[in-house]
Image (tube, helix red, strand yellow):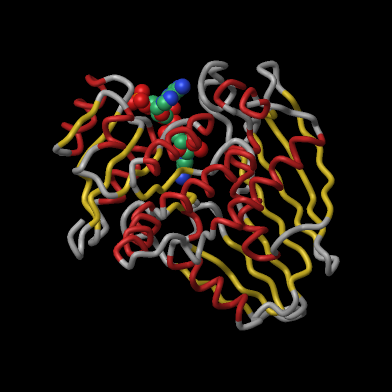
């Protein structure tokens, strides 16, 4: 690694790997140097598409490569822990897509390995990194909304094709709406309200055995409530609404890709809308933040801390336990 530029590698050549490669074009502290697929030909095609010098036909090779400082993991949830550990054991910094893993046990192991190897590890919760979210965190810190009492957030969309083998519906790949989409409302609630004390939840289980729609309510020690929803059955509002004693904030559609929010004072017509459109496709913000941490020798992100990623995964475990839904990885 030279002083200014991180050499990135990507594991997986699917949809989000492409989005991340595109995002990297808008960063000034990283360049894409390698890609790995389970199939060398796929890696070569991806490398050609994105003008990447190194293409590997196994994930082991990219983990062991001297041409890479940091690896972005863009595989299905079921593979995150294994891929992240492989890279960290080879002294690579790891940015791992959301959800961080399938369950809290896997996340605990990932965190333990990051400490043993003394490498930077972060969950790729990209929604936390756009400029609008910095503004929101400032508002929360300065008490602009007063004491937060309720939070609503949802993320639902209707896939064009319902492929039982694809990662959204396949139990073996840890499919389902909660892990794929519900993670966004859970993560937002965690950022705003912290750790809940109570939970109530309902889900529709589909014929592949995963949740196709779910809703849950978290209650916090001060009585605040978060009402959250994920769906693979319909497109929902995809908005978030945070209400406090002084005012409320609406994060407009798509709240998981936050670029616009409106603050309204309680019992008042006074409102203020802020728009902060992405420069790039949005993935550049998390990539740039991660690369800065790595260049500074940090092992963890203050915006997406490891303890919080673990707590979030524990909350997802608790929600699933209520339905109940277990994945093959839960018994490992
Ligand atoms: N941040 C976001 O906005 C966002 C959006 C969508 C998805 N994601 C996350 O990104 C991850 C990947 O999602 P995606 O939509 O990119 O998935 P995808 O298009 O299916 O691609 C996943 C890639 O993982 C690799 N892979 C490794 N083991 C696999 C297996 N057993 N089955 C299928 N593919 C396997 C494949 O690459 P090779 O064959 O080349 O090895 C495949 O191309 C998920 O964890 C998802 O939650 C994040």
Q: Residue at x 48, y 46 (%)?
A: 113
| Image position of 196 (left or right of 4) | right
Q: Residue at horizontal 43%, vertical 67%?
A: 131
Q: Position of residue 133 (x, y in %)?
A: 51, 66
Q: Quadrant of residue 84?
A: top left
Q: Where is residue 139? Give x, y as percent.
A: 58, 77
Instruction: Please state the horizontal and vertical placement of residue 264, each as a whole percent of the image.
Output: 66, 75
**213 and 265: which one is in front?**
213
For the point 24% across and 45% down, which residue is it?
68
Residue sitting at x 28%, y 43%: 21
Q: In the image shown, does 178 or 162 lie closer to the viewer? A: 178
Query: Looking at the image, in which quadrant does ligand 1 appear?
Result: top left
Classify residue 318 by image quadrant: top right
Position above or below: 39 against 178: above
Check the picture and name the quadrant holding the C terminus. top right
Left/right placement of residue 76 relative to residue 296 reads right
Q: From the viewer's perspective, is residue 202 above or below residue 198?
A: above
Quarter of the image where the N terminus is located: bottom left
Near-viewer residue (83 or 90):
90
- The x and y percentages for residue 98 are 51, 44
Could you say which is closer to the camera, residue 239 or residue 225? 225
């Amino acid at each position: 690694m030279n002083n200014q530029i991180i050499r990135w590698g990507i594991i997986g050549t699917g949809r989000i790997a492409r989005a991340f490669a595109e995002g990297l074009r808008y960063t000034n502290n990283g360049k894409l140097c390698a890609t790995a697929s389970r199939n060398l030909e796929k890696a070569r095609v991806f490398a050609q598409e994105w003008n990447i010098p190194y293409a590997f036909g196994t994930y082991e090779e990219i983990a062991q490569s001297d041409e890479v400082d940091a690896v972005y993991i863009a595989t299905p949830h079921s593979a995150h822990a294994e891929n992240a550990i492989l890279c960290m054991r080879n002294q690579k910094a790891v940015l791992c897509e959301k959800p961080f893993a399938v369950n809290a046990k896997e996340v605990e192991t990932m965190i333990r390995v990051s400490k043993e190897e003394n490498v930077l590890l972060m969950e790729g919760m990209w929604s936390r990194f756009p400029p609008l979210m910095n503004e929101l965190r400032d508002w929360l810190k300065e008490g602009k909304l007063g004491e937060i009492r309720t939070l609503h957030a949802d993320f639902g969309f209707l896939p064009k094709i319902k492929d039982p083998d694809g990662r959204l519906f396949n139990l073996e790949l840890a499919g389902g709406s909660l892990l794929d989409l519900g993670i966004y409302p859970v993560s937002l609630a965690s950022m705003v309200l912290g750790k809940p004390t109570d939970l109530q939840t309902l889900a529709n289980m589909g014929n592949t055995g995963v949740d196709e729609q779910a809703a849950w309510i978290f209650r916090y020690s001060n009585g605040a409530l978060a009402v959250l929803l994920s769906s693979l059955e319909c497109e929902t509002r995809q908005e978030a609404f945070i209400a406090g004693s002084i005012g409320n904030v609406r994060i407009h559609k798509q709240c998981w890709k936050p670029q616009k929010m409106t603050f309204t004072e309680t019992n008042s017509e006074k409102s203020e809308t802020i728009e902060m459109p992405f420069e790039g496709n949005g993935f550049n913000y998390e990539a740039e933040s991660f690369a800065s941490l790595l260049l500074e020798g940090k092992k963890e992100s203050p915006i997406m801390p490891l303890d919080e990623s673990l707590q979030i995964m524990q909350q997802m475990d608790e929600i699933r336990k209520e339905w109940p839904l277990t994945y093959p990885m839960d018994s490992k």
